[in-house]
Image (cartoon, rainbow, N blue to C red):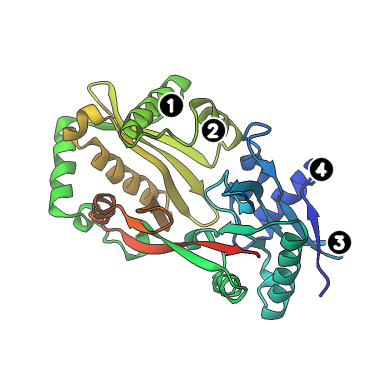
Amino acid sequence: MEIRIEQYRPEYEDVWDKFIEEKSVNGSFLQERRFLNYHENGKFKDDSLLFFEKTNLIAVCPACVTNEDGKKVFFSHQGSTYGGIIVEKELLRVDKLRSLYEVFEKYLKDNGFQKCILKATMDLLCQYPQDLLKFFMTYSGYREIKELNIYIDFERYKQDILCNFSKMKKRNINKCIEMGMELRKLEAKEEISMFHKILSKNLMKYNTKPVHSLDEMLDLKKRLKNEIEFYGVYYNGQLMAGTMVFIFEKAKCAHTQYLASDPDYLKLNAMSFVYYKMIQIYIERQFRYLSWGTATEHGGEVINWNLANNKEEFGSIHGINSIFEKEFY
């Protein structure tokens, strides 16, 4: 099997996105150009790759070039939650993947890369198990970094939503209902702007900022009308908490990219009401999974115990997100 690599060029945009949408088994809109291109020009030095067998596109890898302690790093991808090598089903054979990884590593070495980082797609989003892909990563000398993901599998969920919750969360939800809290879909620029303010205010205590600026959020909403949704919980006409949700229709999975509550009103437990309403909404829409995101930091080395415990109290279970790293000498 002869495989050749081509670097991404703008004329490949439609071919790339069509491959992700129609042929890949482990790709999502987060690896499509229509998502990646929201980054302003110059923010990342692109080094995305296309893998061809003759004229047939069989895999892609969204990536950028970064520098880490003076080392040239191939990073897939710094501008997205997931990256990695995205393949078609026919490539899930030991002989074919061996050929792919040999060509890939030759490219990295020939282009002077000293390190490679690949953020694999979350298993919940894959059309087929990616065990073979992960095996070949470790077989090829990559170190696997594991992050703890927390999610709900609605096929393992009790029909009465509150029966899945801890006693404390049940009390919180009943209190929110008694107070008259309501959930609204955030559509207008002013509504999303208010959510971004709450998110920024929330992150100030960690001396950090949202990954996405308000303008980027609005741009993403315009680019990805069917894949991004915003919701907010209101009390007495004021936004108390909210979420930005990524929708993966093919996988029947919703993922809360951001969850934030106004720190001045934490005692009202509006965030618990956000969780409750998200569960309600995606059950009604017959989704299989609702992902709350990871509860680990610093590459899985630190568990955020409070965050993990909070997510578990809604009847959540656990999965592993994998990041693969390798250094070249």
- Location of residue 171 in the rendering, given as x and y in whole percent from the top left corner: 12, 45
- Location of residue 302 in the rendering, given as x and y in whole percent from the top left corner: 34, 56
Residue type of the residue flagged with mark 2: Lys
The N terminus: image quadrant: bottom right
Spatial CA distance of label 1 from label 2 is 10 Å
Helix, strand or loop under label 3: loop
For mark 3, what is the residue? Answer: 55
For mark 2, what is the residue? Answer: 221
For mark 1, what is the residue? Answer: 192
Is tag 4's residue or tag 2's residue first in the polypeptide sequence? Answer: 4
Residue density around tag 2, few if under 14, some if 14–19, many if 20 or more, within 10 Å: some
For mark 4, what is the residue? Answer: 11
Is tag 1's residue or tag 2's residue first in the polypeptide sequence? Answer: 1
144 to the left or right of 191 = right
Q: Residue at x 41, y 53 (%)?
A: 298
165 to the left or right of 63 = left
Q: Residue at x 61, y 47 (%)?
A: 67
Quarter of the figure with residue 20: bottom right
Is tag 1's residue or tag 4's residue first in the polypeptide sequence? Answer: 4
Residue type of the residue flagged with mark 1: Ile
Is tag 3's residue or tag 2's residue first in the polypeptide sequence? Answer: 3
Spatial CA distance of label 3 from label 2 is 34 Å
